[in-house]
Image: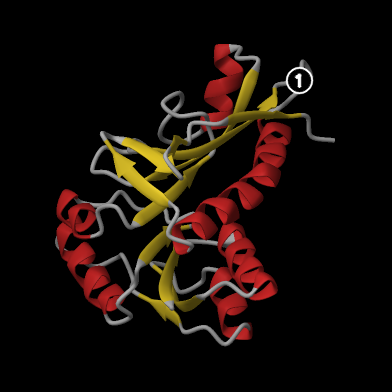
Amino acid sequence: MKSIVILISGRGSNMEAVVRAARREGWQTRIAAVISNRADAPGLEFARQQQIPAVVVPSGGHTDRAAFDRLLQQEIDRYSPDLLVLAGFMRILTPGFVEHYAGRMMNIHPSLLPSFPGMHTHRQALAAGVKVHGATVHFVTATLDHGPIIAQQAIAVRPDDTEASLAERVLEIEHPLYVDAVRSFIDGRLSIENGCVRIKDKVLLTMNMKESA
């Protein structure tokens, strides 16, 4: 049985989606811990309610990012995870930390990477006047919001969209997209070949257009 550790900084709605799907569908996996860099992260209470260890590794008070990452890595490795899932974890990770979990750390980003990395992706998309926007699940590398793409899904940008409305509709597609990606990893169906993610020997760079209500 494979083990998952999930990192959050806030509500962790993608974390909730993964936990609920794993239990509802009977995945052959164990959610070993939910770890946050903030003690007030609402997602920690959900983890406790689900009887999942809810751990805080405060990101403040360290000499540098590397010092925090070392402590975080020590805590994560207590659970020997097969997969590390970033679910709204608002920290830029150091190269050494990323290398330690190479090929077994996932993130979801609210844009169609490589477009609009970093913060305020919906604002960036509206300012650029793009006609489609969406979300990307990828394996994490040392370059921010880059790395082998596992899956993508797109939605149409509406003429009357605001930053808030676009964010809300993208979040709706994030949950099932991330669940599918994590499930594929747990099932042993993902591999990285020549910098591309493959599933059953097919490249997963799928961009499914979805019209949200």
View extreme (front): residue: 201
Picture mark count: 1
Q: Quadrant of residue 167?
A: top right
Q: Which residue: 65% across, 51% down?
A: 176
**Split into 4 quadrants, where in the image is the C terminus?**
top right
Q: Residue 19: give x, y in percent of width and height.
A: 59, 70
Q: In this view, does 103 lie above or below 127?
A: below
Is residue 64 visible from the viewing direction of this image?
A: no
**Is 59 placed left or right of 212 in the picture?**
left
Dividing the picture into quadrants, the one containing residue 80 is: bottom left
Residue 64 vs residue 117: left or right?
left
- For residue 147, above or below residue 68: above
Residue 50 horizontal/vertical position (percent): 61, 83
Viewer-side residue, 109 vs 129: 109
| SS for dot 1 | loop
Q: In this view, does 100 lie above or below 35?
A: above
Residue plotted at (62% across, 59% down): 13
User: What residue is shown with label 1?
Assistant: 158
Which quarter shows the N terminus? bottom left
147 up-or-down from 98: above or below: above
Task: Kindly indicate the quadrant of the structure image that contains residue 163.
Answer: top right
